[in-house]
Image (cartoon, rainbow, N blue to C red):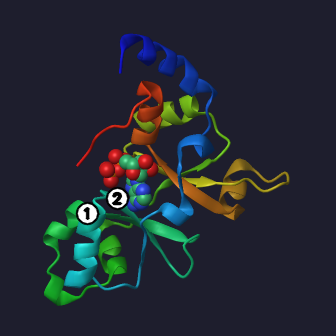
Amino acid sequence: TSDGQLIIGAFDYKHKRVRDVMTSLEQCFMLEASLRLTFQTMYAIYSSGFTRIPVFEGARQNIVGVLYAKDLILVDPDDHIEIGTVLTFRGRQTLGHVFEGEMLDVVFKGFISSANHMLIAHKPLEGSLSRADQLEASPVTGLITLEDVLETVIQAEIVDE
Ligand code: ADP
């Protein structure tokens, strides 16, 4: 990335929205809360390479928490424990929510001031509900991480392990 590109990227990203850079729900690597952490499941998580795995109950839309790959260090694959149990043990960390139409500079500021660098994106429903109620009711369409925003700023893929 040249200096010029960086400056253009820094101006350009402000006009982009969550939906322009998010990972769509179909492409998310997610796991069901009732799934047991067998060697095969743990190997699938390892192979995915992702740090944070959204966990759902029933439908993929219904995200109930997030599994951190690093927490698997403490899991014995012979115990076949449920993913939901790991979440409970960890204190059921939840992810924050955004609308897919929100501007990236707003989301960026949110990322900087929060401990969680992954958010669930929703397609807003028509109507006059409050923001919180609307987020609760509207369908999940993807996830966005700080890296998605940073890549837009630097206009290049961040090479990661
Ligand atoms: P990681 O730390 O797992 O490498 P990053 O936050 O660096 O994840 O994001 C890298 C890219 O991978 C981004 O485009 C992000 O949207 C996507 N991503 C992150 N977690 C997942 C996941 N569980 N499933 C699918 N894509 C993901």
**Residue named by callout 1:** 69
Tell me if residue 19 comes above or below residue 62 in the rendering: above
Classify mark 2 as within 8 Å of ligand 1 or not, answering yes or no: yes
Tell me the residue at 44%/17% (across/down): 5
Which three-letter amino acid code belongs to the residue tagged 2? Arg
Tell me the crowding category of disc 2: few under 14, some 14 to 19, or many 20 or more residues within 10 angstroms, Cα based.
some
In depth, the one of 13 and 146 nearer the eye is: 13
**How far separated are the C-alphas under marks 2 and 1?**
6 Å
Tell me if residue 46 comes above or below residue 97 in the rendering: below
Does residue 23 appear in the picture of this structure? Answer: yes
Which one is earlier in the sequence, the residue at label 2 or at label 1? Answer: 2
Tell me the residue at 43%/66% (across/down): 65
Figure quadrant of residue 20 = top right
Tell me if residue 4 comes above or below residue 144 in the rendering: above
Tell me the residue at 54%/82% (across/down): 58
Please state if 57 lies on the left or on the right of 89 as rendered: right
Classify mark 1 as within 8 Å of ligand 1 or not, answering yes or no: yes
**Residue named by callout 2:** 52
In depth, the one of 2 and 153 nearer the eye is: 2
Figure quadrant of residue 148 = top left
Residues tagged 2 and 1 counted as in contact (Cβ below 8 A): yes
